């Protein structure tokens, strides 16, 4: 039933359309046309206006042929850089780029799979319940499309996001994440003529970071300092440095604990400086006009919340039964990354993450095997079959 040649052509067509984050308009238009030709009711929401994209999220509804609870099916339309002018290459059944760009299998392999699934359902008059397809924007920059999705347009309470590698796994646990930004304000001065008149913001930032445990904290918690920006020239005491990082954990209490620990470290460095400067003023130093310096501005933002789907939930049970019917395995998996599924989960939509076979995402070595895309299409068709059959009993 699955037309592998058509699936391959659809994938090649999609990856050739530039859709780097915030520039998803062209691919949204093309997907919308295809879906409407297949009979979908479509709407593009206003998320793009809120996040600076040239389009919004695309929601497509198929009413189905049997009465059943609606299923959510999700993929994201945006890609990372270098993602312009992609030339797909198919060799020995495996898609790659020509080596100068990413491939865009993340997440256009998912989009191609979803389109092929709908085509197969309709061509073969297969029974299926209502389907709600959600194609999001700006997933790669903090799940922004899903966060600003008009959830009033969604009625499904469970479903699947296609945004992982393993075609025999379903992600049911993902961490929550906090995004942190610190702006340390010091005082500029000539680094050679009068360094004592300055307050080195970079030095203060380094002291704060040096007191932290970075990397893997335990089996379900990590933290990272990923960006440090500051300074103008080597002969100027830097008066400003920006530090950006993140914390992640599958446990809310641990997430709060590690986030608070990092915040406390930056606060402590500033407090210690003021304490020492009052008790041990440096000779020749006059900060009388800058009593508020140094200081730190702190911004902590919840990037996404943890997800946990029980093994007995219909999302897991359906996937496992479908895989079993096909003679395959389906194991529940834990991931350290976030996906649109995290946002849907927070909104009460239990969303398992399925794999399409894509590998080495976000690199010029990215690839996906056509056979894996066919396998995921087959799995999705079987999930829909099982779902419609069980609902009709």
Image (cartoon, rainbow, N blue to C red):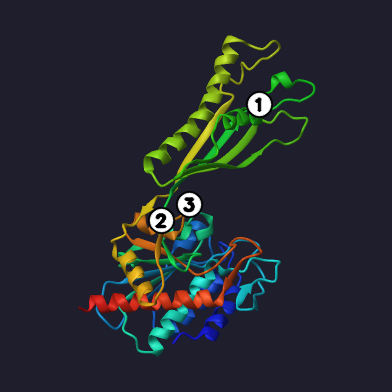
Name which residue lies at 57% across and 71% down.
Answer: 368
The residue beneath circle 1 is: 187
Q: CA distance from mark 1 to mark 2?
A: 41 Å
Of residues 22 and 267, the one drawn nearer to the viewer in this rendering: 267
Please provide percent x and percent y for residue 3. 49, 86
Farthest residue in the bottom direction?
A: 124
Q: Earlier in the sequence, mark 3 or mark 2?
A: 3
Q: Which disc number belongs to residue 274?
A: none
Task: Determine whether the residue tagged by mark 3 lies in a helix, strand or loop.
Answer: loop
Between marks 1 and 2 in the image, the one whose residue lies nearer the viewer: 2
Between marks 3 and 1 in the image, the one whose residue lies nearer the viewer: 3
The residue beneath circle 3 is: 336
Please provide percent x and percent y for residue 367. 60, 69
**Residue 305 at least partly seen:** yes
Crowd rating for badge 3 (residues with CA inside 10 Å; few <14, some 14–19, many 20+): some
Q: Is residue 222 above or below residue 27?
A: above
Q: Which disc number belongs to residue 342?
A: 2
């Amino acid at each position: 039933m699955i037309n592998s040649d058509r699936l391959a052509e659809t994938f090649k067509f999609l990856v050739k359309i530039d859709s780097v984050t915030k520039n998803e308009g062209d691919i949204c238009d093309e997907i919308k046309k295809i879906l409407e030709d297949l009979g979908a009711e479509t709407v593009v929401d206003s998320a793009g206006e809120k996040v600076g994209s040239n389009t919004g999220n695309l929601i497509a509804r198929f009413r189905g042929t049997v009465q059943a609870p609606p299923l959510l099916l999700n993929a994201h339309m945006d890609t990372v850089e270098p993602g312009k002018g992609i030339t797909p290459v198919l060799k020995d059944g495996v898609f790659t780029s020509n080596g100068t760009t990413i491939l865009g299998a993340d997440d256009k392999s998912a989009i191609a799979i979803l389109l092929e699934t709908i085509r197969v359902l309709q061509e073969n008059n297969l029974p299926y319940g209502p389907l709600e397809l959600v194609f999001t924007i700006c997933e790669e920059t903090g799940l922004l499309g899903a966060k600003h999705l008009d959830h009033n347009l969604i009625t499904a309470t469970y479903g699947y996001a296609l945004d992982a590698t393993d075609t025999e796994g379903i992600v049911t646990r993902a961490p929550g994440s906090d995004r942190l930004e610190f702006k340390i304000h010091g005082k500029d001065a000539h680094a050679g003529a009068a360094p004592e008149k300055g307050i080195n913001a970079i030095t203060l930032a380094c002291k704060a970071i040096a007191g932290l445990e970075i990397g893997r904290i335990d089996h379900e918690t990590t933290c990272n300092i990923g960006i440090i920006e500051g300074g103008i020239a080597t002969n100027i005491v830097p008066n400003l440095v920006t530090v950006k990082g993140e914390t992640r954990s599958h446990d809310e209490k641990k997430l709060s604990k590690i986030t608070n620990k990092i915040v406390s470290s930056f606060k402590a460095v500033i407090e210690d400086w003021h304490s020492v400067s009052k008790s041990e003023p440096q000779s020749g130093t006059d900060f009388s006009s800058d009593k508020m310096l140094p200081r730190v501005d702190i911004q902590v933002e919840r990037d996404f919340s943890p997800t946990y789907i029980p093994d007995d939930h219909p999302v897991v049970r359906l996937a496992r039964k479908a895989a079993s019917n096909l003679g395959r395995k389906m194991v529940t998996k834990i991931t350290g990354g976030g996906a649109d599924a995290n946002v849907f989960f927070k909104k009460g939509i239990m969303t398992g993450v399925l794999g399409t076979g894509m590998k080495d995402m976000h690199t010029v070595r990215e690839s996906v095997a056509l056979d894996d895309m066919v396998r995921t299409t087959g799995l999705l068709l079987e999930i829909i079959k099982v779902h419609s059959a069980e609902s009709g009993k």
